[in-house]
Image: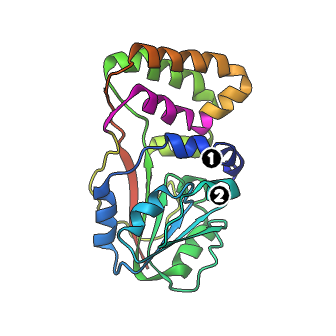
Amino acid sequence: MRNATSFGRQASTYAKGRPGYPAELYNWIAANSPDTEKVWDVGTGNGQAAHALADRFAEVHATDISEDQIAAARPHPNINYTVAPAQASGLTDHWADAVTVATAVHWFADVAFWEEVKRVSKPDALFCAWTYQLPRSTAEVERDFLTPLLALIDPYWAEGNRLCMRGYSADNLNCPFPTLDIPAFDAGADWTAEQLADFAQSWSAHLRAREDGQAETLQTLRDKLLSEYAGQTLPISLPLSLLAVCVK
């Protein structure tokens, strides 16, 4: 995964800035898995999704290719964290009732990955992957922060990021399994200006832009947001794009 290095360098920023996913999503995953004994969480990052899954599954095996991300992950008695590529989990055959991927599958959805999903999964296991779409807010927040920020960092998005923006589908993720219908979910809420700024700073394109000489301009945008919207709550819409399949 080419972005593993940048994710490692961003580990603490990622842990601080990434919002959670709605409880309704995890409830749907548990309800639609053939059992809730074992789940493999791929590309777990700081373990955010793994923790929510641990409330619903007896055992979570959480893997990530980045040693720094795994080092930053919060421990939990039901979670086993392992540094491993998505194509080689280290799990035994037919181990998982469900396989989940939170905002990561676009980096490694190749033939070898889907073969590993099939090998690790029990018959008719659930696979569910999801990713954030770009945030939306009020016209004022869009004008003052999101629109100029996104224009500035647009050249720095990797192809995997652009796949996220187009939305997940079986076709663009090379998925060979039959898809399932899934409800719409939104990870937005009322945020502080600092939460929005931290989320933006966790993006890999933001990091690349900073490293390419745009740090001062990006800091100015952040400072303006924090100054003008101090003490306010900002309504944020953060729709999720999802792919759910039955592993055959």
- Circle number at residue 11: 1
Which residue is more in the foreground, 137 or 244?
Answer: 137
- Which segment is the magenta one? 189-205
Residue 167 shown left or right of residue 118 in the figure: left
Q: Quadrant of residue 247?
A: bottom left
Tally of numbered discs: 2
Residue lying at 54% horizontally and 59% vertically, measured from the top left: 44
Depicted 72 relative to depicted 81: above or below = above
Q: What's the distance in space between the residues labelled 2 and 1, CA to CA?
A: 9 Å
Q: What amino acid does circle 1 point to?
A: Ala
Identify which residue is drawn at 65% across, 17% down.
Answer: 216
Query: Residue 85 location in percent, x, y?
Result: 66, 65
- Figure quadrant of the C terminus: bottom left
Q: Amino acid at mark 2?
A: Ala
Relative horizontal placement of residue 126, taking residue 84 as reference (left or right): left
**Do tag 2 and tag 1 residues touch (Cβ < 8 Å)?**
yes
For the residue pair 17 and 242, the one nearer the viewer reads as 17
Residue 71 is labelled as: 2
Compared with residue 242, is residue 177 higher up or lower down, i.e. above or below?
A: below
